[in-house]
Amino acid sequence: MGIKILLLALALFTSENKSEEVKLTKYSQGNKETTLSVGTIYSKESSMGKLLLNWKNKVSKKTNGEIKIKLYFDGDQGDEEAMVAKMRAGQLDGAALTSGLGIISKPISAVEMPGLYKDSVGLYRAMRRGLPEFRQQFAKEGMVLLGITTSFKYMFSKSLIQLPTELKLMKVRTDPDSYIDYTMAQTMGYTGVMESVSGILQALSSGRINVLIASISNTKHFQWSSHYNYVNTMPIAAEIGGLVFSKHKLDGLPSDHRQILISTFADLADKYSNALYTSDQKYLTDTPLTVTTATRSETAAWYKVFSDVRQNLGANGTYPVAWISKLEKGL
């Protein structure tokens, strides 16, 4: 009797193990590991680099290692225009972009028109409201916008600048691919010095540029601030970034994995943006540069010119007037 009971127990144990083995085999076959390639011009040590590494680790954990992300830092996949081209050609799955967002969908670049947002609260609310529409615009271009990061651009200069008219005598860096920068130069009457991001440091060292409108995080990361004496606390314009993927690539993933990729980055992007704003305020307090704050009349003069720039961007056909008006109203 004892032997029969023992044999029965062994049979049940073997049967349960086989059943569990079948379950595990089915699970592993239905959820193969996928590696996604993502490029960025930023370094691993930069704030954006740290954001991407955090996102990568969280995605891996939430998908039990089934989604692996290969990150290419320091422009290893080329500049932002090159990375967008590679995504469209299927040679790169995703990219963390700044100005490159406008290469994919021009309307989103209008967010960086000067004077649209005066503080982080207004900028954050507008981007939260606009994200669904931005995502629709990207979907039409065969891309998925996972989330948006936000910060502000400030004016760094060699000499004290208080009014817009003073820029006419300065050498202001202008992005060669920016419709906004070109229209700002025309409207404000200065001759912009065309220079890509990669050439700014050399242009600063040689004195070809003595005014730079840029985010504080980029100014620190690319070591530009040491070439300036002044920074003004007035936000000139928003700077947005985002993580973009090929829609074709994401559509090939299980729906739960797609949702994890998107929601995880969107949540981290919000926290990252808040941290950037806090870091900016600390920089403006601790920086060795001379920090200036525009008076009420000076601020009014700047915002009048900013309004003129936006009006001209509509008049010259860069952006539809209705779209500019929508952004001005916070979407």
Image (tube, grey):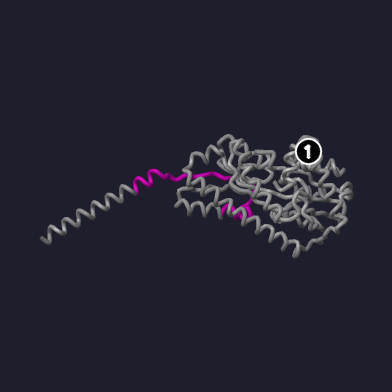
Instruction: Depth check: give the residue in front, 127 or 35.
Output: 127
Instruction: Depth check: give the residue in front, 201 or 236.
Output: 236
Note whether 89 is above or below 284 in the view shown.
above
The residue carrying pointer 1 sits among few (fewer than 14), some (14 to 19) or many (20 or more) residues within 10 Å by Cα, namely: some
Residue 299 located left or right of residue 33: right
| Residue in view at x 64 percent, y 42 percent | 133
Residue 17 located left or right of residue 304: left
Instruction: Depth check: give the residue in front, 314 or 77.
Output: 314
Residue 246 in the image, given as x and y percentages of width and height = 56, 39
Tell me, yes or no, whether the highlighted magenta stretch contains residue 47. Answer: yes
Residue 329 located left or right of residue 302: left
Note whether 151 is above or below 316 in the view shown.
below
Residue 264 in the image, given as x and y percentages of width and height = 55, 52
Instruction: Depth check: give the residue in front, 277 or 222.
Output: 277
Report the number of numbered marks. Answer: 1
Residue furthest out toward the bottom: 286
The residue that disc 1 covers is 314
- Amino acid type assigned to the residue bearing label 1 in the image: Gly
Residue furthest out toward the left: 1
Note whether 15 is above or below 175 in the view shown.
below
| Residue in view at x 85 percent, y 53 percent | 300
Residue 49 in the image, given as x and y percentages of width and height = 61, 53
| Residue in view at x 78 percent, y 51 percent | 236
Tell me, yes or no, whether the highlighted magenta stretch contains residue 199. Answer: no
Residue 163 located left or right of residue 136: right
Magenta stretch, residue numbers: 24-53
Residue 203 in the image, given as x and y percentages of width and height = 78, 47
At mark 1, the secondary structure is helix
Image quarter in which the N terminus is found: bottom left
| Residue in view at x 38 percent, y 46 percent | 28
